[in-house]
């Protein structure tokens, strides 16, 4: 699902939604703004039917029903591939942005209307008129003040909702960051590698993107001998080393298990080989010990394979060629860097 309407169209939908929410005493929170915005956009026929039924039955939309409808129709909470989940998240972010802008426009317009109406009635009251007209003006003044009070109250509600929407947007950004980050090492995870590679190709379509596959040597034996807790500590240490050694534009990714990928745009093959050797030497020189027992542990070594793009080839082919170089490094004794041209 995508949200392609213009800012003007978004404002129209919201201006229709606001009176409906006031009429049925619906709380102006992000769930309800999203629901009634979507209701008037006509993107979700089933949502329209369900909301019509609920309003007809309850003359409002209770908060628990709003949340259920939001999750069912807007977020659509069932399992999708990562790429489709990203599309939905982008759609929600677009909706949040549209709501934020439309709420601000509607709030400004309603406040201006309220002020102008009050000023006009005050001017009329100062004019010399007949008694029967004065009585009508008094009633009009009373009704307008009540209307202005409702508008001001809803204006305050929209301001509060705007704050909630901004909070929701921040939470969505945090969720997106968490989904793209490896929890143990703090590096980007495998699902982001394709995105980074595509971005690199957009900047440089030549054969100047290198990829390094790195594997910690004998990591399974290390885990079996020293335990998975120590193994996790080693992975964290490797993550810190990669962060320190991989200055921009190099991007380090935990590919899975004890495997890591370094995407290296714009540094050429020689630059990638230099980075690989620096990492290999750095890791093998770090002293390790078991803090619980005080026993010294063997140093961590890694084998690395390097490949460079062959005129914007697909990522899987580049990974395969770097993996071939990594396999060669393993065959020749580990703790070394090899390249596939």
Image: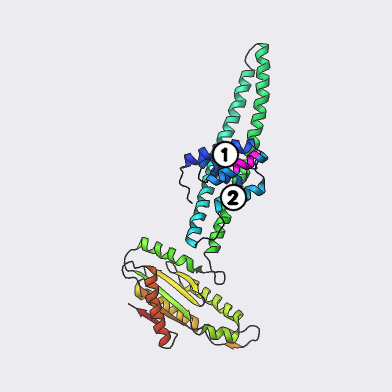
Horizontal side, residue 325 vs residue 243: left or right: left
Q: In percent of the image, x 47 and y 70: which residue is there?
A: 252
Above or below residue 34? Residue 132 is above
The magenta segment is 51-56
The quarter of the displayed image where residue 275 is located: bottom left
Q: Position of residue 122 (x, y in %)?
A: 63, 22
x and y, in percent, of residue 128 in the image: 63, 12
| Real-space CA distance between mark 1 and mark 2, rounded to the nearest whole angstrom | 15 Å
Q: Quadrant of the C terminus?
A: bottom left
Tell me, yes or no, whether the highlighted magenta stretch contains residue 54.
Answer: yes
Residue 178 in sight: yes
**Residue at label 2?**
70
Q: x%, y% of residue 96?
A: 54, 48
Instruction: Point out which mark residue 17 bears.
Output: 1
Characterize the magenta stretch by its predominant secondary structure.
helix
* N-terminal-most mark, 1 or 2: 1
Element type where label 1 sits in the image? helix
């Amino acid at each position: 699902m995508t949200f392609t309407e213009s800012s003007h169209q978004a404002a129209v939908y919201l201006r229709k939604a606001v009176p409906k929410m006031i009429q049925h005493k619906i709380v102006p929170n992000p769930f309800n703004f999203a629901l009634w915005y979507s209701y008037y956009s006509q993107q979700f026929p089933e949502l329209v039917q369900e909301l019509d039924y609920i309003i007809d039955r309850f003359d409002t939309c209770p908060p628990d029903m709003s949340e259920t409808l939001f999750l069912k129709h807007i977020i659509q909470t069932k399992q999708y591939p990562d790429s489709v989940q990203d599309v939905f998240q982008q759609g929600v972010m677009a909706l949040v942005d549209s709501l934020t802008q439309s709420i601000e426009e509607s709030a400004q317009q309603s406040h201006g209307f309220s002020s102008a109406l009050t000023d006009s009635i005050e001017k009329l009251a100062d004019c010399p008129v007949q008694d029967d007209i004065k009585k009508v003006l008094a009633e009009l003044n009373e009704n307008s003040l009540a209307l202005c009070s409702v508008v001001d109250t809803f204006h305050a509600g929209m301001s509060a909702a705007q704050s909630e929407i901004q909070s929701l947007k921040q939470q969505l950004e945090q969720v997106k960051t968490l989904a793209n980050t490896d929890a143990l090492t703090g590096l980007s995870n495998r699902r982001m590698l394709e995105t980074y590679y595509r971005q690199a190709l957009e900047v440089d379509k030549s054969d100047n993107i290198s990829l390094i596959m790195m594997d910690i040597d004998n990591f399974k034996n290390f885990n079996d001998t020293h335990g998975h807790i120590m193994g996790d500590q080693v992975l964290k240490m490797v993550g810190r080393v990669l962060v320190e050694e991989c200055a921009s534009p190099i991007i380090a990714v935990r590919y899975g298990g004890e495997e890591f990928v370094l995407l290296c745009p714009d540094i050429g093959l020689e630059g990638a080989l230099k980075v690989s050797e620096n990492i290999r030497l750095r890791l093998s020189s770090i002293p390790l010990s078991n803090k619980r027992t005080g026993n010294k542990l063997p140093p961590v070594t890694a084998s690395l394979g390097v490949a460079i793009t062959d005129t914007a080839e697909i990522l899987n082919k580049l990974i395969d060629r770097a993996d071939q170089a990594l396999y060669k490094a393993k065959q020749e004794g580990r703790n070394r860097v090899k390249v596939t041209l």
